[in-house]
Amino acid sequence: MKNRDKILLGILGAAAAGVAIGLLFYTEEGKKTRKKIKNTAGDWADSFGSLLESGKENLSDLSHKAKESFKKAKGKVQGAYSDAADEYSK
């Protein structure tokens, strides 16, 4: 892409952003749209917070289960080791 094309694309992008900002801040419909955006963003934030909390609880449960499984496996290995040591020492 030539520099001239990049400059033209940049100007068009800036103009589009200016039009969007103008519509959002200087029209009655823009006020309604800003309110909808604010409410939607708030809803998304609440949903994300709930999702994070749920994820933390699931991770905690998984961690607890992993610790219990490790304890059981360790006990079995120690038992097998003791049995083998007893059998070897005979």
Image: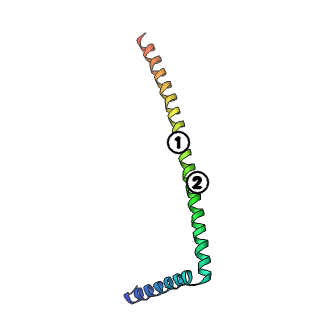
Residue under the image location 55 percent in, 40 percent down: 61
Q: How far apart in space, not on screen, are marks 1 and 2 (Cα)?
A: 15 Å
> Does residue 63 lie above or below 31 as drawn?
above
Q: x, y percentage for residue 41?
A: 57, 66
Q: Give the residue number, with chain letter if any, for mark 2.
A: 50
Numbered circle sitting on residue 60? 1
Q: Amino acid at mark 2?
A: Ser
> Does residue 39 lie above or below 73 as drawn?
below
Taking depth in this image into account, of 43 and 1 the one nearest to the observer is 43
- Left/right placement of residue 46 relative to residue 67 reads right
- Left/right placement of residue 1 relative to residue 55 reads left
> Does residue 8 lie above or below 60 as drawn?
below
Q: Nearer the viewer, mark 1 or mark 2?
A: 2
Residue under the image location 49 percent in, 29 percent down: 71
For the C terminus, which image quadrant? top left
Q: Residue 89's image quarter?
A: top left
Q: Earlier in the sequence, mark 1 or mark 2?
A: 2
Residue under the image location 49 percent in, 84 percent down: 18
